[in-house]
Amino acid sequence: MTSNDELTIAELFDFAFDLQQKLETNKIEQKLETFNLAINRLKLAEEKLDELHLFSDNEEINEVSTNELRYFILYALIGWLYEYRSSNREQRLDDIHLAISYFIKYLQLCKNYGLVQNIPKEQDDDNEKFRLHVSEDRQIKIQKLKEKKLLEQSVAKLREIMHDINRVDDEIKRQLYIEQIKWWIKQTEEDIIELKDEIKLIQFSKDPFPQNNNTTTATATNKLPIDGPFTLVTTKDRLYKEAVGGAGYPSLPTMTIQEFYDDLTKRQSQQPIPPPKPARLSEEHLDEIDDETHRQNVRLMDEYKDDNPRGSGNRYNRS
């Protein structure tokens, strides 16, 4: 039986890559032993790559051969395996740090070849230590998701072509490896943010009120900084009494009913009396008014009545 040390880089990488793909798609049971086996194979491949110095920081991506290009994602695969490896609570924090370390190592390799511009820090600053990352702008996030989806479709299409032996050539392989590298760049950037937030949540669960040099928000016994008594559970009646009813409901009377009506009468008597409305003129007075406009209106009304006798507009039950 061939030992791991006697296996080539290609054999180690292909075996671990196949395991990672099956674990990601749930084609095999996600056992801890399977994750450890894939990690060990990839770490052996990493050692062999370091001995050969296949990658350099003073060359471009076009100068890397196609067979060597597929090993670009080795660090990303190790980081993914650490990220999703099942472990207990104490081991989980170590796995997260290892995953972030390998993801950043992968992004640094991509930066050396001009594939990315900036890489995140492995640890946040002190002022961001206990603050979750703010969500990105909606449009930027949608754009990243679209780009990642296009890369997924391109990788899936190229892998289908790879299964056809007659259509496989060096150009197809190279295009597939480049698309995989770009997809893993976006995936690792997302995972680093999520893993950093998970670290903060784990640390907060251990110490919900961390001590700070500038603030003293909690005591050594993690007690809430509250002065005086407080009510943990309140009721609707309590809220009404404090916010609406004042001293309580029903409140104490301030005057008798007779005093209330006397006060109401006094306030009404102080209001100004509105002027009387002018009396409506009778028909005789209207006829006596010597005004050209009034006479014209009367004349028009008489003509209207001649053309429209009373009841002429009622068409109900007429044959």
Image (tube, grey):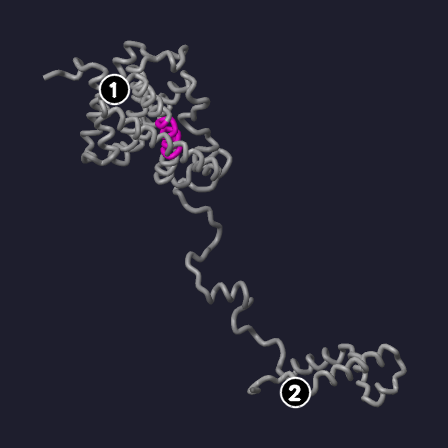
Residue 228 lies, in percent from the top left, at 48, 53
* Figure quadrant of residue 157: top left
Q: Name the element at disc 1.
A: helix
Q: Is residue 95 visible?
A: no
Q: Name the element at disc 2.
A: loop
Q: Is 292 covered by the magenta stretch?
A: no
Q: Is 186 covered by the magenta stretch?
A: yes
* Figure quadrant of residue 191: top left
Residue at left 81%, top 79%?
A: 297
Which residue is more in the foreground, 280 or 106? Answer: 280
Residue 126 lies, in percent from the top left, at 46, 30
Please state if 300 lies on the left or on the right of 229 as rendered: right
Pointer 1 local density, CA inside 10 Å: few below 14, some 14–19, many at least 20:
some
What span is colored magenta in the figure? 183-195
Residue at left 42%, top 59%?
A: 233
Residue 266 lies, in percent from the top left, at 73, 80
The kind of residue tagged 2 is Gly
Q: CA distance from mark 1 to mark 2?
A: 105 Å
Q: Is residue 174 visible?
A: yes
Q: Which residue is mark 1?
A: 43
Disc on res. 311: 2
Which residue is at the far bottom? 284
Pointer 2 local density, CA inside 10 Å: few below 14, some 14–19, many at least 20:
few
